[in-house]
Amino acid sequence: MNSSFRFAHISDLHLTSLDDVKVSDLLNKRALGYLSWRLRRRREHAPEVLAALLRDLRQLTLDHIVITGDLTHIGLPSEFQQARQWLETLGAPTDVTVVPGNHETYVNTAWDNTFALWTPYMASDSGIRTIAEQRPGREFFPSVRVRRRVALIGLTSACPTAPFLATGSLGPMQLKRLEEILDQTGRQELFRILLIHHPPVAGTVGWRKRLTDGPALSGLLARHGVEMVLHGHAHRPFVAHHSGARGPFPVIGVPSSSALGRKLDHRARYNIYEVSPSPAGWAIRMSVRGYVLQDRCFIGEDQHDMAVPRSGNLKSSA
């Protein structure tokens, strides 16, 4: 039996169309998001890149796909429906895990015609619902999905904010539940992957885009440990190492997986990870796949090997 777990991390797809938006939809902060889409994002997040992404993912042998938010532009119910249809082309809900991004929560919206459409892709495994009650709203998270020896732990940092802000927040209740989940999955000796939209490392993004309770999350992870954190939001690649209870662990962000990229480091990329148990702990192989404009396809760009021990220091090599 193969003990490794191979999965893809994509993010910030902005895959929806706003062609049929009504004026009445824009009588709030969404007007700013719509203006951004008209002036910039509709030319940056291209359908041909999304099509190439789907083709590339389908030709790979993967156990799972994780998406760390921003499937929509301004969080309209029609966008949630478009995104649900796209998710269905990507894979079954048991094979795809989604956490929300800030573009999904431009304003307060009714759960039933927005996030409820994504529930199959966000919900915890049925046997784990005693850890995190599955109720509409932020109480839905953290989510927990266990695949082989890997625990996928989803958080929502998405919340409505004032105009010109794209900050995120977890809140004390979500942090408290996360503490319990990390302890339980740690005792089970699972490889714990934390999925969040906003980067937890200070300085990754500017002040107006930060995770407001990032220091609280960092402190919790330092006390209780985790094996990997994956995020989006910054629209550029990011790798850092954070101190945890069992030793340092990687914090990795990916650019938008649909961007043509006016700046080279903003061009569409995504990562493939292969996680395997090792005598000292866990071995991770990270492969980067990037979009090539002239060929309209994704290709392998780089590869890194990392070791996350049960104790001691994290080692990595290019």
Image (spheres, grey):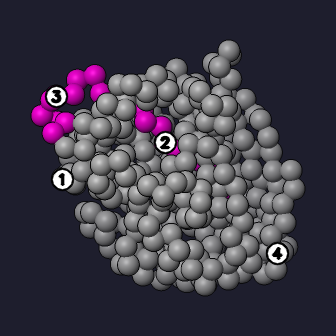
* Majority secondary structure in the magenta region: loop
**Residue named by callout 3:** 22
**Disc 1 to disc 3, how far (Cα)?**
18 Å
- Between 309 and 75, the one lying in front of the other is 75
Quarter-wise, where is residue 296 in the image? top right
Q: Quadrant of residue 278?
A: bottom right
Q: Secondary structure at mark 3?
A: loop
* Relative height, residue 113 to residue 158 (above, below): above
Q: CA distance from mark 2 to mark 4?
A: 32 Å
Q: Amino acid at mark 4?
A: Asn
Task: Name which residue type carries label 3.
Answer: Lys
Report which residue position mark 4 lands on.
313
SS for callout 1 = loop
Give residue 110's mark: 1
- Neighbour tally class for label 4: few under 14, some 14-19, many 20 plus, Cα within 10 Å: some
Alpha-carbon neighbours of circle 3 within 10 Å: few (<14), some, or many (≥20)?
A: few
Whether pointer 1 and pointer 3 mark residues with C-beta atoms closer than 8 Å, the reply is no
Q: Is residue 81 visible?
A: no
Provide residue 144's location: percent of width, then percent of height: 47, 67
Identity, as a three-letter code, of the amino acid under mark 1: Ala
Q: Which residue is mark 2?
A: 12
Q: Magenta region: which residues? A: 2-27
Residue 183 appears at what percent x and percent y? 55, 83
Assess whether residue 265 is covered by the magenta stretch: no
Among numbered discs 2 and 4, the one appearing first in the sequence? 2
Residue occupying image coordinates x 68% and y 15%: 294
165 over 226 or under it: above or below: above
Q: How many marks?
A: 4
